[in-house]
Amino acid sequence: MNLSDSIVSVKGIGDKTAKLFAKLGIFTIDDLIRTYPRNYIEYSEPRRIKDIVPGERCAITAKVVTTVEVKKTRRLTIVSFSVSDTTGSVRMVFFNSTFLRSVIRKGDTYVFVGTPKVSGSFIAMEMPEYYPIYKYSQLRSVMQPVYPLTAGLTNNVIRKTIKEVSYLIEGLNDPLPDDIRSEYGLMPLGRAAFNVHFPRDMEELKESIRRLAFDEFLHFLYDIKTLRDSNVRQENLHMVSDEAVSLLGDFFNALPFNLTKGQMDAVNDIKADMTGAFTMNRLIQGDVGSGKTVVAEAALFLTVKSGYQGALMVPTEVLARQHFNDLSKTFSAFGIKVELLTGNNTAKEKREIYERLKEGDIDILVGTHALIQDKTEYKNLGLAVIDEQHRFGVNQRKKLSAKGGSPHTLIMSATPIPRTLAIIIYADLDISVINEMPKGRKKIKNCVVDTSYRKTAYKFIYDEIKKGHQAYIICPMIEEGEQTDIENVIDYSYGLSDHFGKEVRIEYLHGKLTEDEKSGIMKKFTDGGIDILVSTTVIEVGINNPNATVIMIENSERFGLAQLHQLRGRVGRGNAQSYAIFIDTKQSKESKERLSVLENSNDGFFIAKEDLRLRGPGDFFGIRQSGEMPFNIADIYNHADMLKMAQEVIIKYSDRLNMSSVTVNETTI
Ligand code: ADP
Ligand code: MG
């Protein structure tokens, strides 16, 4: 077996299971190996039945005291039996598991693990795990990895599958020669990967995670280096004209506001780049709501007025459509033609767009990945803007900037990375920072509350709606297995509709809607046709509806602070006072402390730093700061030292590393 083999070549994996793996993005054995646990659990000491707390997952050691009963309903086969210890009894209930009849015998003793609940006059556990006593004590002695799951694919199946290929994990090819590895005190890659899947002790596990983080950084920085080597100091082939520069004032005059100093500085950096000797590769970094879009617009304006085309690439269609609408409005007065291209256009529409683009009949093309597909040919692309760039890998960046003969590139990011780390991660880019908010913005008012406050929050939202404003509610996240996030968003919305009645217009948004549906809902929301938008975190990126003044986030304790900050950034984008309500369901000491950081600060950089400081020692993976970064296990904050180490290794030893860079098929560009 090879790493690049499909996972169907692993023993026990058929086409059906492979399809489930595919849902997790796992196609090859290599993908499987790189699917790291999200967490580890330790199996707890079994309790006496009388000490069970309903709703709290636990283990009990108990004897089967009845025969196994099988009952068929229309939809389900229910298998159940009772178990007892000296202190009480519990009813075990399984669905569609008829095979248990021949497995479980009256008189046998097992350890059952599950979440007990009160069911009429007795306590029941649904679908518990069950283990022979000896097996359970084995489990107790090691930490059990918990993998990301998809419906139908259990943790056990993933674990077993990984076990089948464990010899390949140990033999993983290390990009570091032994002497470099020892110089930096890193363990062999194969051992690290093995430990992460089959951890034995805490310390070793932590070291292993750090090694894997190091490797992700190493590959990333290596790619960046190749990108930079090919890009650096390229002659400016798309010189911005003096005339375009002189027209820029008209563009500013047409805006309903004055630029902040930070925005102005960024525009000046861009102007200097685009009129300079070399091609621009610039990152605009600015907190949510700092007004990055208008900076990009200024750059696009300069480009078009100098006779070139511009492209604006964003991660989602919803955002593409929003930008398209804004740009069309702003630019129509200047005779600049803006067009939208997404995966959603019909074949005919696309053909038409390609045609017009090639002829130069489109000045600015806005869209998603479609912008870098092979068929998209520009007449003379002068500037490629990438918004919320963290969703794009190096490869895509490379592909876009290679289009049409080294256009300028401008990348906009809201990820709050300290400067020292930013210059490593964005080594191929110059950086402009917008470090102030537009004037007249009122600071978002925050409150962190428990679930008993929910009714009051609804009332508050209702009052805002009556004032003509709108609200977001970010739906609770779901514990593995119970229900899907989607079902939950839908249920929650129905609950809300019951609460508010017909008077309040409520709609929901989740990732599985089609792009058309999503765009339709977003448009309706920004047009004021929806009062409360209930959503999963799909609205996290970039969306701008200045009329929305409240965001309420359920289960706030389960989000990373940086993500909460991004979500909160959906409000406070206009002049009205805005509010963020964080529901803390857990009310633990830790969650209170973490959320109080948000309550007291609206500064993305500060929040990211505090989040790092507050992480506990058992917090292996942390909560992702920026799930948008192209890393699987590495976190730029948590593993900042590894990032710096990887950078040093690249600088000192890049020609001794055993790896290859990302490939872009140049012929297709
Ligand atoms: P982000 O940096 O999060 O991408 P946007 O560019 O979407 O922020 O800007 C957020 C809102 O602020 C928009 O409605 C935009 O029109 C407005 N805005 C941008 N710059 C200014 C400014 N200098 N003064 C007032 N409002 C501004
Ligand atoms: Mg934006």
Image (cartoon, rainbow, N blue to C red):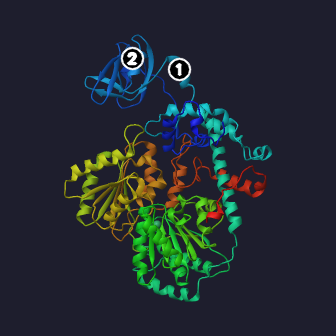
Q: Is residue 35 above or below residue 576?
A: above
In the rendered image, residue 39, in percent from the top left (x then y), is placed at 52, 39
**Front residue of 133 and 583:** 133
Which residue does the image show at 19% across and 58% down from the upper left?
Answer: 503
Q: Amino acid at mark 1?
A: Lys
Q: Amino acid at mark 2?
A: Arg
In the rendered image, residue 425, in percent from the top left (x then y), is placed at 63, 59
Which residue does the image show at 39% across and 66% down from the upper left?
Answer: 544
3D distance between C-alphas at marks 2 and 1: 21 Å
N-terminal of the two: label 2 or label 1? 2
In the rendered image, residue 180, in percent from the top left (x then y), is placed at 78, 47
Mark 2 residue crowding within 10 angstroms, few (<14) / some (14–19) / many (20+): some
Q: Secondary structure at mark 1?
A: helix
Left or right: residue 637 compared with residue 99: right
Most distant residue in the right direction = 179
Disc number for residue 163: none
- Mark 2 C-beta closer than 8 Å to ligand 2: no
Left or right: residue 222 compared with residue 267: right
State the residue position of label 1.
Answer: 135
**Front residue of 657 and 90:** 657
Which residue does the image show at 38% across and 55% down from the upper left?
Answer: 514
Q: Is residue 290 above or below residue 179?
A: below
Where's ligand 1: which quadrant? bottom left
State the residue position of label 2.
Answer: 101
